[in-house]
Image (cartoon, grey):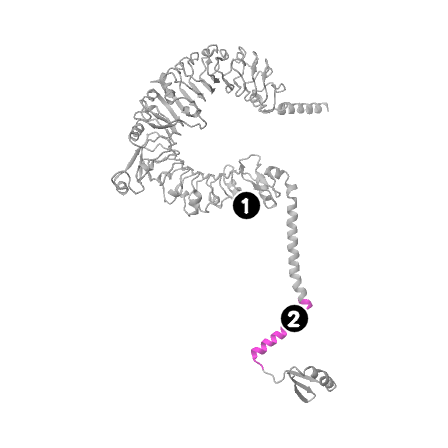
Amino acid sequence: MYRQIFLMFLIIIIRFSYVYCGSCHIRGKAKSKEADCSSRGFSTVPTNLPVDIKKLDLSRNLIVNLTAEVFIRYRTLQIIILDENRISHLEENTFGGLEKLEKLSMFGNNLDLNASYQKNVFSPLVSLNTLNISRNINKTNGKKVFYPFFGKLHNLSILAVDLSINPVFRMSGLKRLTKLNTLFFDFCYLDKMTNKTFFYMPETIANITFTGCTIKSVAEANFLRPFPSLHSLQLKRVCVDYDSALRILYPFENKTMNEIKFKEVNPGYCDGSVRSPNAVIITANMMKYLQNICVRKLSMIKNGIVDFKPKSLLFYHHPECFKEIEFSGNRFSIMNGFKTMELICLIRKVSNLFKFQFSGLLGSIPYSESGFNRYPISNKQIKSSIKVTVPFPQNLKKLVLRNFVGFQETIPHIPIHFRNISSLSHLDLSNFRMKYFPEILFNGTNNLRYTDLSGIDSILYSGRKSIPFLQKTNTMILKQARLGLTFKRGKKIFNLVPSVTNLDISYNHLWFVPNDAFNSNSNLCKLNMGYNLFSEIPIAVMTLSKLSHLTLVHNSLQTINSTLRNWFDMQNKRLKTNMTLSLVGNVFKCTCENSDFILWLFHTKIIFDKKNIAFKCSLVNGTITNTRKVYEEFHQLFSHCKSEIWLRVGVCLLVGFVAFTLPIAIVVNFRWRIVYCIYRTFKMVVEKDMKSKFRYDIYLSCADDCLGWVKNILIQKLENSWENVCVYRGSRYSSWKYSS
């Protein structure tokens, strides 16, 4: 008995200590035990957690101060997250006892670099490799900011910190850190890029990211010289002249870099109420340092570039180094004059390029409406005499031309031949605005497996019997392609991609799909029909024998009928893996008519996008709830449904009984009259058909004792009837004719 009581007591202790621990949630076991105490309203570090936890998440609480040795109880901690609290002060030995800590994040607090960090506050963290204390500076007054001492964090490799307007790193000890290779500068208030800014930084830095800086003066060329090992440079939302941004690349001439990324690098993003980039024209002098760098990945995104001069943007001394090039969100063209020739020359030299992305072209060259272009020969003559061949880098695998406008207006309507296209497997032409869909031909093997034609009117190509470069496409994206209009006109489109296994037709405002729409797509496994207007699942999906993933999120579905439910269950049995059905964003009807559907949701083996199957549904009174709650209260909500059915059955039986017995009762009660009426009617019909004629209208045979009644009563009633009457008495006949 005592043993049972002891076991029950032990279970209670384990229950409350390892699952709840106050208001924290404990996950994992042994070496992976984690304590999730986020968004719990703590003002201090909880002390009732398991001592062997490896990760402690205290983000989004109300902690202001961290006292000395506040984590001493949890010596096995490897990760501490204190993001988005109100921490403004750290004691000198705050992190005492945390020799095993590997990651510390205090992102988004009120830590002042000059006042909040006591000397040697980070010294106990000898195993720390990641430290994030960024987004703590809310304002700057231009004074010198002395960064805390990091000199004893010999294993530190990643440091995320704010960059003040006048930073001083001399006493930070960063130069001692031989393993530090990555710097993230967030909340960047730096206004000058001088040669001495990073003088006390270690030479081991390989990756630097600047975010949100506002540089008011011209950047000095040796700004990044303290980082001779730099391989990755990213500038995001940095308000600086583009000329200055390119100038800081000077120390890396004739060196190799993995990535150079300039995103939203333009002073216009920080000026005025409308934050938009100033117009930038790239010149050869601006690009002279970048052109001499062997860079593998080059990205220039939303920098306000409107044009470029010869031997600038498309001219490089080490083009064979390129693996990825991205020019997105700008406003320059590459399809006119010298630019086309420079592009072709670059294409022939970038032998290792596997991804090219160019998007954001807003301008276009007007095409003559008269049917002739600016050349002296007509379009028809051009079509018959010119063959357009476009060379491709031999290793190009991914080509992205999004939001592209104006290209086809510079060439006639003729087939385009792509050369050396065998490596291309990914083609993205989304929002490629065009008035006609060009005929594209490949020279070589077609290995294209992914195609995105979103934003292109499907009417432009739906009438074609075949598009060669789409024949082997496995993944097809057709968002915002006006498919509804194509279906309305009775045109087929999916027969153009017979090999497709993954099809996305979301965002098309579809409310119906023809029943034979997918007859040519026997290999289709994944179908996305989300964000449309379907009130019921199209029957066309039942023709897809290999369908395993169906997405119908954010439509107008209210139920799934029994036919489709049975098909889904059968499909689930045919497949080796369970079928997946995504229904989030629909509001189903939780009524008696749909009660079978509610039960099916919880009894089927199909996998839904919500694991708890809590989809929105509307009750009879209009209340919005979810299918999980309805299922749990199923008997209470739908107990009256069967009684209603039996009531209907009873009413039907009563009506049937009345309808059956009433005619029988009438026949029984008036049987003689009915017989007489039938006889009389029959007789009149027979007489009419036989055209019989009689001398007398009334014939009466009577005995002598009835003769008085006949004379005195009957004959008086017949006086005005105009009937001929014959009375037979014994062997005598008497006849009268009475009339008025």
Compared to 368, does 264 lie above or below?
above
Q: Is residue 519 visible?
A: no
Residues rendered magenta in the picture: 667-692
Quadrant placement of the C terminus: bottom right
- Residue found at the far front of this picture: 272
Residue 28 at what x, y percent from top left? 57, 24
**Neighbours of disc 2 within 10 Å: few (<14), some (14-19), many (20+):** some
Picture coordinates of residue 2 (x, y %)? 72, 23
Please tell me whether the stretch drawn in magenta is mainly helix, strand or loop. helix
Q: Which residue is mark 1?
A: 561
Q: Is residue 13 above or below residue 92?
A: below
Q: CA distance from mark 2 to mark 1?
A: 53 Å
Left or right relative to 665: residue 335: left
| Residue 429 in which image quadrant | top left
Specify the amino acid type for callout 1.
Asn
For image coordinates 68% across by 67% down, the residue present is 668
Q: Amino acid at mark 2?
A: Ile
Q: Earlier in the sequence, mark 2 or mark 1?
A: 1
In the image, is 138 to the left or to the right of 26?
Answer: left
Q: Is residue 627 visible?
A: yes
In percent of width and height, residue 239 lies at 42, 22
Mark sitting on residue 596: none
Q: Secondary structure at mark 1?
A: loop
